[in-house]
Image (cartoon, rainbow, N blue to C red):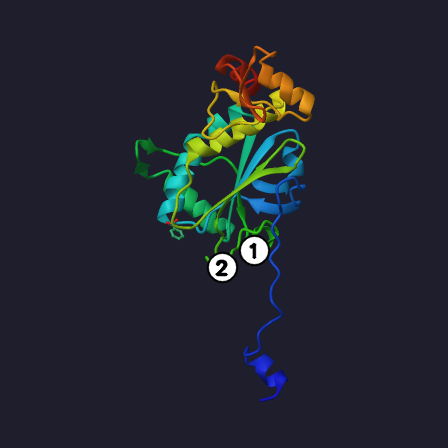
């Protein structure tokens, strides 16, 4: 069979598709898109704010529905942290509108009359999803995975989390990450495993032998050094809250 005929019959492998994946520390890829709240120019429209851009596999699916009810119910907690939520799936606008209207009629875990007021992007052509690496063919060629991009006020991607379709996101963790990023920026500290506001924080590691020696001598009474490279200090919940909720 000629190559042309093969091509016409769809038998020839296309040149392997390239999937771009933006990375932490890079500018958030820009796009214009239609949403359930009108057209948006992302991330420009939200410069100066934190953004959580997240994808879900499809409208009218059970896990996504529980997530949307939770996102909408907890939206005020994100807003209090100067954070705009923006959702996306590979569905059309009318499907989005119908689904969000249906969600308002549901009751789940005490959540009811839930109105989703943050923008939900229609992305039938997968243009945005492909730009952000939300289509992961091992999971699905046509549906986005559950991606979460944390984007800072200067529009830099600061954290990326991916979940498979079968796993709903943990909203306490999303809020913990958002708070952690802001605290880390504000106080110039790192945060240990399972950090929560009010827990001790990690100071930058000693950058010279002299500083390492001083730290181990215990000269700085504010520091608790487990070893020269692992020193923590107190950062009260009051101070953290004051920085987070300016
Ligand atoms: C859901 O939202 O229920 C779902 C979506 C994709 C795969 C599995 C579950």
Q: Observer-nearest residue: 63 or 114? A: 63
Q: Position of residue 56 (x, y in %)?
A: 46, 47
Q: In this image, 83 relative to 76: left or right?
A: right
Residue denoted by label 2:
142
Label 1, label 2: how far apart the Cα atoms are: 8 Å
Quarter the C terminus occupies: top right
Asked if the residues shown at circle 1 and circle 2 are in contact, with their CB atoms under 8 angstroms apart, the answer is: yes
Quarter the N terminus occupies: bottom right
Q: Give the mark nearer the N terminus: 1 vs 2.
A: 1
Task: State the residue at coordinates (64%, 16%).
Answer: 214
- Dot 2 crowding, Cα within 10 Å, few <14, some 14–19, many 20+: some
Task: State the residue at coordinates (69%, 21%).
Answer: 210
Q: In this image, 204 relative to 57: left or right?
A: right
Quick check: 99 above or below 212? below
Residue 126 is tagged as: 1
Quick check: 42 above or below 238? below
Q: Observer-nearest residue: 24 or 230? A: 230
Q: Where is residue 17 in the image (x, y as percent from the top left)?
A: 60, 64
Q: Does any portion of residue 115 appear in the rendered image? A: no
Secondary element under disc 1, as helix, strand or loop, is loop
Q: Where is residue 171 in the image (x, y as percent from the top left)?
A: 43, 34
Secondary element under disc 2, as helix, strand or loop, is loop
- Dot 1 crowding, Cα within 10 Å, few <14, some 14–19, many 20+: some
Task: State the residue at coordinates (54%, 18%).
Answer: 245
């Amino acid at each position: 069979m000629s190559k042309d005929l093969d091509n016409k019959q769809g038998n020839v492998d296309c040149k392997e598709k390239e999937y771009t994946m933006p990375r932490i520390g890079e500018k958030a890829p820009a796009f214009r898109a239609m949403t359930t709240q009108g057209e948006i120019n992302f991330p420009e429209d939200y410069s100066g704010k934190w953004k959580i851009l997240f994808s879900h596999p499809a409208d009218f699916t059970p896990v996504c529905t529980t997530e949307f009810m939770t996102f909408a119910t907890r939206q005020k907690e994100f807003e209090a942290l100067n954070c705009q939520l923006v959702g996306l799936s590979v569905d059309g606008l009318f499907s989005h509108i119908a689904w969000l209207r249906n969600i308002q009629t549901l009751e789940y875990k005490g959540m009811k009359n839930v109105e989703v007021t943050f923008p939900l992007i229609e992305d039938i052509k997968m243009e945005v999803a492909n730009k952000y690496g939300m289509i992961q063919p091992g999971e699905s060629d046509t549906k986005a995975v559950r991606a979460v991009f944390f984007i800072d006020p200067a529009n830099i991607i600061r954290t990326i989390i991916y979940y498979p379709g079968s796993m709903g996101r943990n909203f306490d963790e999303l809020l913990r990450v958002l708070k952690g990023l802001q605290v880390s920026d504000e106080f110039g500290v790192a945060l240990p495993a399972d950090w929560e506001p009010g827990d001790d924080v990690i100071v930058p590691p000693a950058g010279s032998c002299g500083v390492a020696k001083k730290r181990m001598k215990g000269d700085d009474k504010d520091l608790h050094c487990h070893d020269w490279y692992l020193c923590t200090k107190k950062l009260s919940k009051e101070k953290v809250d004051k920085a987070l909720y300016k």
